[in-house]
Image (spheres, rainbow, N blue to C red):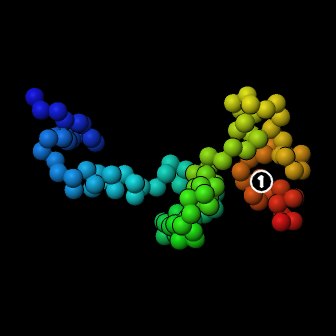
Amino acid sequence: MPPSLIIENSVFDILMKKSKDYYTMLITKKAQFSNNSLVLKRDFNLNEDQLTKVFLLLHIVCSEAHVKAPQYKVLNFILYTNTKLHKIGYITDDKCSFCKSEPETLLHLLFNCAYSKLF
């Protein structure tokens, strides 16, 4: 039996496929929205076109990886705030580093914190 993979309920015969098939498979997975895009869509009342623009903006604004990385982390809700650090036991308090009044979630840090509003 030739080596093969089962991808989305179909057999992907690795000996019969060409590089174009591998590339197509990678691109279709890469072009999908992340799971957190639904949260962005819901919390900010975005339609499909707006959501696409939000994720494309990351690539339009800059080309340097060190500038894209924080933007990517914010868009995908993987930036380590005090709430996440507290949840994994890294710190003892989840309060905001600046205002010290509310838990430091990403939304609080970027939109609701009194110090962020001053900025």
Q: Which residue is at 14% across, 41% downward?
A: 15
The crowd level at tag 1 (other Cα within 10 Å; few <14, some 14-19, many 20+) is many
Residue 109 vertical position relative to residue 88 in the rendered view, above or below: below
x%, y% of residue 99? 89, 50
Q: Which residue is mark 1?
A: 109
Question: Along the horizontal axis of the image, is 48 left or right of 77?
Answer: left
Question: Along the horizontal axis of the image, is 11 left or right of 119?
Answer: left
Q: Quadrant of the C terminus?
A: bottom right
Indicate the quadrant where residue 82 lies. top right
Residue 7 vertical position relative to residue 40 in the rendered view, above or below: above
x%, y% of residue 43? 64, 57
Q: Which residue is at 64% across, 55% downward?
A: 70
Question: Along the horizontal axis of the image, is 38 left or right of 98?
Answer: left
**Number of labelled discs?**
1
Judging depth in this view, the residue of 5 and 112 nearest the camera is 5
x%, y% of residue 68? 58, 60
Residue most extreme to the left: 1
Secondary structure type for disc 1 = helix
Judging depth in this view, the residue of 48 and 109 nearest the camera is 109
Indicate the quadrant where residue 5 lies. top left
